[in-house]
Amino acid sequence: MIILNGGKMKISRSKWDSFIKCPLCFYLLEKHKIKAPSTPGFPINSRVDALLKEEFDELRAKGKPHPIFEEYKLNFVPYNGLDEETLRKYRHNFSGVRATSKKTGIEIYGALDDLWLNKDTDEIVVLDYKATSNKNLEDYTTSSKHYHKGYLRQLDFYAYLLQLNDFKVHDTGYWLICNAADQSQMSFDKKVNFKTTLLPYKLKTDYIEDILVDLKSCLDSDKYPQSGKDCDNCRWYNEKKKLGDTIRSNQNTDKKNIKKDEGN
């Protein structure tokens, strides 16, 4: 969401990422209120997310590590350096962690799933929960799929927000992936078995400000930007327009031929 309040621009992590995916769709929405078609959310993913937060919050209160940390031999614990209200704010979509861009002055924000603490380095560990169902779990860090690349940028953005808030951030972030792909489960029986996996990612934040500069220039301009090369909406529109032009051309040709026949 982009909000102008007293002349100051505010932009969420998701809006920043939508600009990367397709500057044209971003521009049409923010400048002309033309919204591209979207897919509905996945309530079951939201429920998995909520259950994980409850699970980690319980361990946070006890100062205990999660079993998955022990499984991966990580000296981590849920971070307990925030009061409950601040943690709730950091997790909320419309508040989140907030900071001011150094190059543009834009207020940027994003909602975190959680924060962990690396006890060996006393650094904050950035993470995101992911719920999926894939027989062969893909490595997001090497995947060519554009939405997986968005997962990388998501962690980068969270890390940068925390850095701007003077947190000492560990250089590796993680996805806690809950994968409902237990092939041994032969019946539903009112439950789905998930396997949890930790996937590490070496964080990169040096490009984020440059994207914000480009984003602000886009909004300040009256020129339409190029569409994103992986934008499904623009691809669909262009193919539809091309087909429509062909159909209209054929229809016009048919009308001319009919008039010609009538004249004869």
Image (spheres, helix red, strand yellow):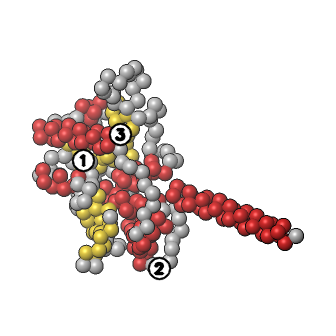
Q: Which amino acid does label 2 sit on?
A: Asp
Q: How crowded is mark 3: few (under 14 residues within 10 Å), some or many (20 or more)?
A: many
Residue 14, image x, y percentages: 36, 58
Q: Nearer the N terminus, badge 2 or badge 3?
A: 3
Circle nearer the viewer, 3 or 1: 3
State yes or no: discs 2 and 3 in contact (Cβ < 8 Å): no
Q: Residues within 10 Å of mark 1 (few under 14, many from 20)?
A: many
Which disc number belongs to residue 187?
none
Q: In which quarter of the image is residue 206?
A: bottom left
Circle nearer the viewer, 2 or 1: 2
Q: How many labels does the image show?
A: 3
Residue topped by disc 2 = 222
Rounded to the nearest whole Å, what is the CA distance between mark 2 and mark 1? 39 Å
Which disc number belongs to residue 114?
1
Residue 194, image x, y percentages: 34, 30
Which disc number belongs to residue 131?
3
Of residues 55 and 186, the one drawn nearer to the viewer in this rendering: 186
Q: What residue type is labelled 1?
A: Asp
Residue 48, image x, y percentages: 28, 39
Q: Is mark 1 on a helix, strand or loop?
A: loop
Q: Nearer the N terminus, badge 2 or badge 1?
A: 1
Q: In which quarter of the image is residue 19?
A: bottom left
Q: Which quarter shows the C terminus?
A: bottom right
Report the side of 142 relative to 94 (left or right): right
Rounded to the nearest whole Å, what is the CA distance between mark 3 and mark 1? 15 Å
Of residues 98 and 226, the one drawn nearer to the viewer in this rendering: 226
Q: Residues within 10 Å of mark 2 (few under 14, many from 20)?
A: few
**Residue drawn at point x = 29 percent, y = 74 percent:** 4
Report the side of 144 relative to 175 (left or right): right
Q: What element carries label 2?
A: loop
